[in-house]
């Protein structure tokens, strides 16, 4: 099995540096173009199954890749973005002002500490474990695309590969970046991570926002 992991395209809140979490913010014009470019990159790839989060920014990105294919996008709540709780909609500066103690603790232990009323990376890893177990039962020659969010991608990578908690917390995924993992004899091997070759020359490749 080959597993392709992609992040959704850009939204206005991404561009403004606002934490989104479970807020269902749609793709902006840049994000729609990024989704189109991702679909163009993958047009000659055989894709047997596509999964996405319920949130529209991921679902719309997945639907763009699915266009012209006889493959339905299956939405799953366990692929949703991490819950940022009270931080949703706020910029980092606003969070520092309103939740300074929580933010300090989060910065020191980003893997295990959750945002105020939110979800930690460790909790995301647990949340996606059943999904990964379901995928790994299929060891046939298939290619699966998962379109999700940066926080959820950290949890997926944590569940698949041997990273330390600090390494998982430091992982970064650009908008519509592609990560490829191949399973050989049931063991996952990283082919490449966070590739945005399809965005050559775009603002996202030169100066990405998380």
Image (cartoon, grey):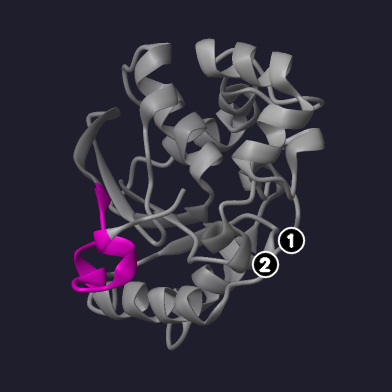
The answer, for residue 109, to whether it is visible in the render is no
Residue lying farthest to the bottom in this orientation: 68
The quarter of the displayed image where residue 119 is located = top right
The quarter of the displayed image where residue 39 is located = bottom left
Of 112 and 131, which appears nearest the observer?
112
Mark 2 and mark 1: Cα distance apart in space: 6 Å
Q: Residue at x 70, y 58 (%)?
A: 54
- Per the image, the residue denoted by label 2 is 56
Of 15 and 28, which appears nearest the observer?
15
Residue 190 highlighted magenta (yes or no)? no
Q: Earlier in the sequence, mark 2 or mark 1?
A: 1
Instruction: Give neighbour class at mark 1: few <14, some 14-19, many 20+ (Cα, 10 Å).
Output: some
Of 126 and 84, which appears nearest the observer?
84
From the viewer's perspective, is 160 left or right of 54?
A: left
Q: Residue at x 58, y 68 (%)?
A: 73
Q: Give the residues drawn in magenta, as a range.
A: 194-206
Q: Residue at x 57, y 37 (%)?
A: 131
Q: Residue at x 31, y 17 (%)?
A: 162
From the viewer's perspective, is 43 left or right of 102?
A: left
Q: What's the mark number on residue 108?
A: none
Q: Of the residues tagged 2 and 1, which is closer to the observer?
A: 1
- Per the image, the residue denoted by label 1 is 24
x then y, percent, for residue 66 = 47, 77
Depicted 2 relative to depicted 184: above or below: below
Residue 195 highlighted magenta (yes or no)? yes
The answer, for residue 105, to whether it is visible in the render is yes
From the viewer's perspective, is 67 left or right of 190?
A: right
x then y, percent, for residue 33 = 42, 81
Mark 2 touches mark 1? (CB < 8 Å): yes
Depicted 192 relative to depicted 6: above or below: above
């Amino acid at each position: 099995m080959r597993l392709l992991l992609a992040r959704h395209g850009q939204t206005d809140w991404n561009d403004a540096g606002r934490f989104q979490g479970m807020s269902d913010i749609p793709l902006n014009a840049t994000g729609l173009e990024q989704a189109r470019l991702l679909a163009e990159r993958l047009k000659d790839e055989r894709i047997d199954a596509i999964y996405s989060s319920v949130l529209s920014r991921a679902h719309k990105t997945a639907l763009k890749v699915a266009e012209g294919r006889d493959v339905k996008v299956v939405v799953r709540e366990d692929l949703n973005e991490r819950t940022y709780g009270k931080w949703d909609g706020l910029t980092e500066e606003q969070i520092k002002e309103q939740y300074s103690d929580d933010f300090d603790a989060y910065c020191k232990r980003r893997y295990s500490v959750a945002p105020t009323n939110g979800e930690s990376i460790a909790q995301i890893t647990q949340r996606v474990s059943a999904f990964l177990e379901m995928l790994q039962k299929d060891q046939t020659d298939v290619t699966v695309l998962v379109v999700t969010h940066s926080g959820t991608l950290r949890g997926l990578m944590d569940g698949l590969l041997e990273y330390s908690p600090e390494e998982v917390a430091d992982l970064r995924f650009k908008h519509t970046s592609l990560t490829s993992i191949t399973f050989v004899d049931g063991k996952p091997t990283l082919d490449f991570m966070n590739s945005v070759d399809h965005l050559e020359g775009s603002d996202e490749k030169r100066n990405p926002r998380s």
